[in-house]
Image (cartoon, rainbow, N blue to C red):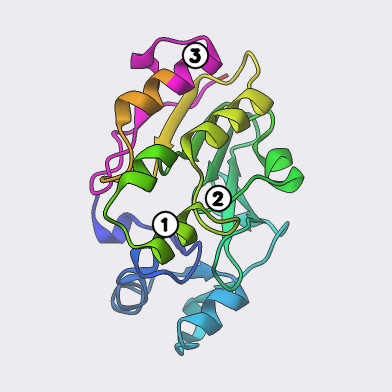
Amino acid sequence: MACADIDAIFITHEHSDHIGCAVVFAQRHQTPLWMSAGTHAAIGSPVLGSLLRLIRDGESLDLGTFEARPFTVPHDAREPLQLRCSDGQHHLGIATDLGHVTAHVLAQLSQCHALLLEANHDPEMLVRSAYPPFLQQRISGAFGHLPNQVAAEILRSVRHPALTRVVAAHLSERNNDPRLVKKLFADVLGWTADDVVIADPKRGTDWLDVHG
């Protein structure tokens, strides 16, 4: 994929591992940059002119071949948003960087044909890790990141026969094990472990079909 092939960039929140070089990229390639007003303020309110597209929970983002609808999540950021995307027939739910599940989050992830869901850490591995107590508390707190078991409970709540793709994402390299996540998700879904995809922290995943 060439830079010119990118129609827009959506920023979920202001943390450095999510904002990256998006502002510079957008300015260089004149790519529209979507984010919440809170995220824009949190990154210093850069002047982006017509490239800046502010959006909030429940509003619709029309990208031609599909629609994206952001929703709020509980995370330690100013106005974090995740996405539900649809081409009118198939629905993809994306939820990473949230400390706990809310009824609103579950509603946005219901009846999706594919999910990309955070499974950040195994609590026992986190407790045994070399992370300092303040960082452990931040990760495991109500506005931190989802532990594996909570992510699995989300799957249990929203699973339905037309859910055919699940990608586990944002796994901690030090405090998680992809094999644990695969088995846990597969047991909840009634799938084999090989049916569960793990997103690589640098490469993401291969292109995946979303179908009902």
Dot in front, 1 or 3: 1
Vertical placement of residue 191 versus 44, above or below: above
Q: Please check the rendered image and state whether residue 206 is part of the magenta-colored stretch, yes or no.
A: yes
Using a 10 Å C-alpha cutoff, classify the residue at mark 2 as few (fewer than 14 neighbours), some (14 to 19) or many (20 or more): few
Q: Which mark is residue 136?
A: 1
The one of 114 and 180 positioned closer to us in this rendering: 180
Q: CA gap, disc 1 to disc 3?
A: 27 Å
Q: Secondary structure at mark 1?
A: helix
Q: Residue at 47% across / 77% down in the picture?
A: 51
- Can residue 153 be spotted in the picture? yes
For the stretch drawn in magenta, what is the main secondary structure?
loop
Q: Are marks 1 and 2 in contact (CB under 8 Å)?
A: no
Q: CA gap, disc 1 to disc 2?
A: 42 Å
Q: Which of the 4 quarters of the picture holds residue 156? A: top right
Q: Secondary structure at mark 2?
A: loop
Q: Which mark is residue 64?
A: 2
